[in-house]
Image (tube, helix red, strand yellow):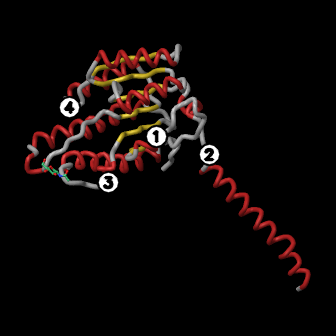
Amino acid sequence: MTSLRWFFFLIVLPSVYAFSLRSCHSRVTSILQMTTPQQAFAGQTCVITGASSGLGKSLALALAECGASTLILSARSQERLEEVQRECQERCQSITVHCITADLSQPESVNSLTKQTLAKLASIDLLIHCGGVSSRSRFLDTTLDVDQQLMQINFFSGAALCKAFVPKMPKGSRIIWISSVQGLMGLPNRSSYAASKFAVQGYCESIRAELAVDQQISVLERRMVSLMPRLPPEPTRTTWQVKY
Ligand SMILES: *[C@@H]1O[C@H](CO)[C@@H](O)[C@H](O)[C@H]1NC(C)=O
């Protein structure tokens, strides 16, 4: 009995402790497993909508700095896209940047964007869907036409892009769809906008579950822009590696 007790205290207990510590350690390191933006995006092919200004433009420049191989930049203005193209090429000499104008409010234009993109890229590693519009008005003053426009621009266009591109996205690729805090909560005067962003949330949650299983494509809808990765050269972590 005594030897059994010693066996327990000297062998079993330390082993269990060591084992749990180790598995705990590996879990913590895998949670904290951070990839630098350069490691995550070097050599990747990326499609960015809403790329002529704001967040879309900033992300295009950041991806160029990370050494992405090809960028497809889309927005309505060819002139502004070419400006972003030039800036990307200044940051990365080897990068290929294509500008494709598209108006997300027109389904045919979205269709043409997907066709032109697929003609240029055999495979897509990253889709960042930033293109969208906002609106503010009391719901009784908002015509149904405005509701429909917002749904087309903020939601249906993104659904069309996902359907067209996912078959060309390899395992480990990513879809980032810019949502909003309004995708979680409706506020006065924001009925159309909130509805379109709620649609984005629900859609992303569903396709994330579908795509995680077979294709291992991560789908991330960003509600808070402040969570976007910091730009190089700040050597840091990224929040992109979210797994479902
Ligand atoms: C909503 O819009 C109306 C009309 O423009 C305005 O009077 C009201 O202050 C707005 N409400 C909020 C919470 O912004």
- Residue 207: image x %, image y %? 37, 46
- Which numbered disc covers residue 228? 1
The CA span between labels 2 and 1 is 17 Å
Q: Classify 10 Å Cα crowding around label 4: few (below 14), some (14-19), many (20 and above).
A: some
The circle drawn on residue 33 is 2
Image height of 81 relative to 34, above or below: above
From the top left corner, tell me how far across and down residue 201 is, in percent: 33, 49
Q: Is residue 71 left or right of residue 144?
A: right
Q: Secondary structure at mark 1?
A: loop
Dot 4 amino acid type:
Ser
* Label whose residue precedes the other's in the sequence (1 or 4): 4
Q: Secondary structure at mark 4?
A: loop
235 over 78 or under it: above or below: below
Q: Which mark is residue 105?
A: 4
Q: Nearer the viewer, mark 3 or mark 4?
A: 3
Q: For marks 3 and 2, give the CA distance.
A: 28 Å
Of 126 and 79, the residue lying toward us = 79
Q: Amino acid at mark 2?
A: Gln
* Distance CA(mark 3)–CA(mark 4): 23 Å
Within-10-Å neighbours for mark 1: few <14, some 14–19, many 20+: some
Identity of the amino acid at label 1? Met
Point out which mark residue 88 bears: none
Residue type, mark 3 in image: Leu
Alpha-carbon span between mark 1 and mark 4:
26 Å
Which tag is nearer the camera, tag 2 or tag 1?
1
For the point 55% across and 26% down, the residue is 42
